[in-house]
Amino acid sequence: MAEARRRDAAATRAAILASARVGFARGGYDGVGVREIAEGAGVTAMMVNRYFGSKEQLFAEVVAQIMAEPTILTRANIEAPDFADRIAANLVDITAGGATPLDGFLIMLRSSSSDQAAEIGRAQIEAHYHRVLTEALAGDLAPQRAAIVLALVSGIQVMRQVLALSALTDADPADLRGLLEPLFRQLVRAP
Amino acid sequence: MAEARRRDAAATRAAILASARVGFARGGYDGVGVREIAEGAGVTAMMVNRYFGSKEQLFAEVVAQIMAEPTILTRANIEAPDFADRIAANLVDITAGGATPLDGFLIMLRSSSSDQAAEIGRAQIEAHYHRVLTEALAGDLAPQRAAIVLALVSGIQVMRQVLALSALTDADPADLRGLLEPLFRQLVRAP
DNA sequence: TCTCCTTGTCTACGGTTGTAGACTAACGCG
DNA sequence: CGCGTTAGTCTACAACCGTAGACAAGGAGA
C-alpha cells in the first residue's frame, strides 16, 4: 500500500477496496473504521464516501467481490469423484486447489454483530455457497447435507483462523486430511 | 428486567451480568454498549464499572460464567457409548440433554473482531472444551479429532443461529440426527 | 497559456463510546 | 434517633465514529 500514486481514480478505488477487504476480514464490519481503511489505501477518509457512498455500501461491495471469486465450491469440483479429497485438502492447505478460501465466511461471522452487515452477506452465502452445493449434491436431504458440509468447512476455518487451535494449526496436514476425507465422503453420498 | 428493586447489591450485580450475557450473545463484545447493558438491568451505566471495573472485565466474567456451565461436553457424556447420538441430538434440539448449549462459541465468534475479547475466550474454549474432549476421546490424533468435533459443533450452531440457514432451522430433527450421528461416531472412534 | 473538471485534503459537525468524579439517598447499627 | 457506610444517579470528559461541505491542486483540452 501507500505507493506514490497521484490522481488515479481507478487505482485509488481499487486500493480502498483492497484495504477495506483486509480490514473487514480482520475485524468485521464494526472492527475497522473508515479512517483506518483510508489510511491503508493512502488516502483520506472522505475518499471512501466519495467513491462508495458510505461505509455500508463499501462493505456490500467487498462482500460481493469476495463471494464472486472462485472457491472450492464450484460445480465442477463438487461433482468430481474426488470432491471429498479436494475439499479436505483445501481446508488443510487453504491455498490448495487454486481457489480462494471461503473468506466470505470469516467476514460474515465477524460482522454478524451488526445488523446492517449481517443481512448483506447472509443472502450471498445462501445464494453462492449453499444453493450451488445443494444442486450439486442431489439426492435425499441434499439441502441438509449441503448445510452440514458448509458447517464443517466454516467450523474448521473458525477453529484454525479465529481461535487458532493449535491442534489444527500445528498438525500434520496428512493426518488432518485423513480425518476429514471420510466425513466429507459420507456427506457427499446420498443416504 | 427492570423489577422494582432498590439497594440490593447482589441482585443488581446479577441483573447486570444477565443483561450483559444477553447483549454479548446478540451482538458480541462490540455490539452492545455499557449504557444498553445497564438499561437492561435497570441501572445506570456507571454501575457496570462500579461492580465489574470495566466493560472488558465484565465480558471476561460473562464468558467465564458461560464456560463453567454444564454442556454436552462432559466427561461422562463423552465416554458414554452413545455419545455420538447425544451430541447429535443436542445440536438438533439445543435444549436436549439438560445441558446449556455451547453459547460460549457464539459469543466468542461474534466477539472475535475485538482483540481484547478474543484472547479472553480463546483460552477458555481451549481449556473447557478442547482439553476435556481431547482427554476423553483418547487414542491416535485425539487433539485433532477433538478439534474437528468442536468445529462441527460450532459450525452447525453458526449455520443455525447466525446465518439461519433454512435447511437446518426448518428440517426434520430426525433427519438431521440421522446425518450427524455417523459423523460424530466416526470422530469418536480412534482411527 | 488559459480554463474547467476531476482528484484529493482540511476542518468540522453531531453522535456515541468507555470511563471518571462528585453528589444524593437509602439502609443497618449504635 | 442519629450517623456512617454503601448503593445509586448525574454531569462530564476525552476519544472515536461516519459523514458533510468548502477548498486546493493536478491534468487535459481549447
Image (spheres, coloured by chain):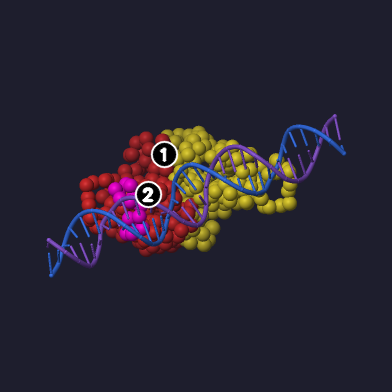
Chain colours: A yellow, B red, C blue, D purple
Circle 1: element type: loop
* SS at mark 2 in the image: helix
How far apart are the alpha carbons under marks 1 and 2?
Answer: 29 Å
Q: Residues within 10 Å of mark 2 (few under 14, many from 20)?
A: some
Query: Residue C18's image quarter?
Result: bottom left
The tally of labels here is: 2
Q: Give percent across and percent down for residue B106.
A: 40, 49
Horizontal placement of B79 versus C4: left or right?
left
Chain of the residue that carries numbered disc 2 in the rendered image:
B
Identity of the amino acid at label 2?
Answer: Arg
Q: Which residue is mark 1?
A: B164
Mark 1 against mark 2, which lies toward the viewer? Answer: 2
Q: Residue at x 63, y 47 (%)?
A: A44
Residue A54 against residue B28 in the figure, above or below: above
The magenta span reads B38-51
Res. B18 in view = no
Q: Which is nearer the N-term, disc 1 or disc 2?
A: 2
Q: Which mark is residue B35?
A: 2
Left or right: where A93 falls relative to B20: right
Position in image of residue B187 (x %, y %): 41, 54
Please indicate, yes or no, whether residue A46 appears anywhere in the rendered image. Answer: yes
| Secondary structure that dominates the magenta span | helix
Q: Where on the picture, by quarter, is residue B78? A: bottom left
